[in-house]
Amino acid sequence: MRALVVDHSAPGRLALGTVADPEPGPDEALVRVAAISLNYGELPTNTGAAEGVVPGWDAAGVVERAASGGRGPQPGDRVVTRGRGGGWAELRAVHVDELAVLPDAVGFTTAAALPVAGVTALRALRVVGVRPGLRVVVTGASGGVGRFAVQLARLAGAEVYALVGSAARGEGLAALGADHVLTGAAEIERPVDAVLDNVGGPLLSELLGHLAPEGVVASIGATSGQPAPIHPYQLVPNRLTLRGVKLGDGIGHDLAHLVRLVADGRLEASVDRVADWSEAGKLATALLNREVRGKAVLTIG
Ligand SMILES: NC(=O)c1ccc[n+]([C@@H]2O[C@H](COP(=O)([O-])OP(=O)(O)OC[C@H]3O[C@@H](n4cnc5c(N)ncnc54)[C@H](OP(=O)(O)O)[C@@H]3O)[C@@H](O)[C@H]2O)c1
């Protein structure tokens, strides 16, 4: 089958190649992939993956063969899937606990954007105990995780502060539900209850000074690539909690929840770029250069 493989000499370190078909285990369905999405954390530039590896967490398509163990969707079912790799290919073997069946109303391009970014945002909001009236900051709000976090926080009744790198990067966030779109922590006028942090570095350090007593930080990622110095005086007197977020396995139920929200018109997948998968390197480079607002999706031609 054809697949996107790591090629360190190619633009974006990705190239189309030919690899062996996957062999599904007893709890895995075989899916013919129609669309995939790119996540910052899986790009070969960031992972340093070996030459020839097929990356790919998010993929949507049609079940070709049901899991031999008898669980999960049946041939012909349209599904969105998530795995730890191997999704950027014509065929994916996926565990039946890592997928959701799609209603006709949700297209493959939209669905492919949901798994890692959407479910991470959902789970990070659970970590901070999202609830009506919670004042929550989302950093890197312009990105994939960020745009889902803004929408899901607002749906849960929170007051949302979307932090972005520039006014242009903040475009569209108010329409998605951000109450405040800010380009720096200094613009936060009164203490917030929670931070969902995608950026890390000095921005995270600065945000600690804007947290209310008992405030919670959910650390999702560190796109800044910089350390975040923390002075104990920021933690001890205010009893702040700093928690790491890990997507983890078994995301099928959460994914199905997001699919329902999309089908009901309550959640937008924020697909900013769609291209044929032969353009993968170009799109990966755009994502790394902070040119994508939301998600970048590739269709399998
Ligand atoms: N813990 C987990 O399980 C998990 C799951 C998914 C993702 N993640 C992590 O969460 C973070 C966000 O992922 P994502 O998919 O949303 O990424 P993304 O779409 O690329 O968005 C990241 C955002 O970070 C901001 N940013 C600030 N400084 C940056 C820099 N120096 N380089 C690049 N971006 C910078 C950008 O916003 P501005 O341009 O507006 O500043 C960008 O929109 C990543 O670190 C990723 O690895 C973790």
Image: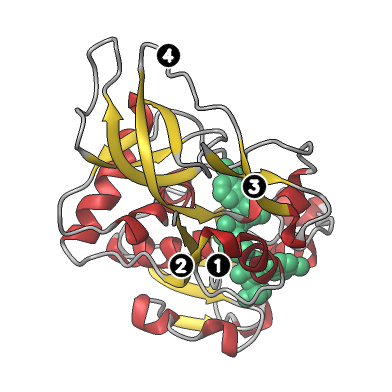
- Residue 172 lies, in percent from the top left, at 43, 83
Task: Tell me which corner region of the image, top left, top right, bottom left or bottom right, holds residue 174.
Answer: bottom left
Which residue is disc 2 drawn over? 147
Q: Residue at x 33, y 54 (%)?
A: 111
Q: For the point 48% across and 60% down, which residue is it?
A: 298
Q: Which mark is residue 245?
A: none
Check contact, mark 3 vs mark 4: CB within 8 A.
no
Does residue 43 appear anywhere in the picture? yes
Residue that carries the numbered disc 1 in the rendered image: 143
Location of residue 210 (image quadrant): bottom right
For residue 83, side relative to residue 257 (left or right): right
Verify CB contact (< 8 Å) between mark 1 and mark 2. Answer: yes
Respond yes or no on whether mark 4 lies under 8 Å from ligand 1: no
Q: Tag 1: residue type?
A: Gly
Q: Nearer the viewer, mark 3 or mark 4?
A: 4
Q: Nearer the viewer, mark 2 or mark 4?
A: 4
Quadrant of the rendered image containing residue 72: top left
Left or right: 84, with 78 as reference point: right
Q: Characterize the local packing of mark 4: few (<14), some (14-19) or many (20 or more) Cα atoms within 10 angstroms.
A: some
Q: Determine whether label 4 and label 1 are within 8 Å by CB.
A: no
- Within-10-Å neighbours for mark 3: few <14, some 14–19, many 20+: some
Residue 33 vertical position relative to residue 121 in the rendered view, above or below: above
In the image, the residue with mark 1 has its CB under 8 Å from the nearest atom of ligand 1: yes
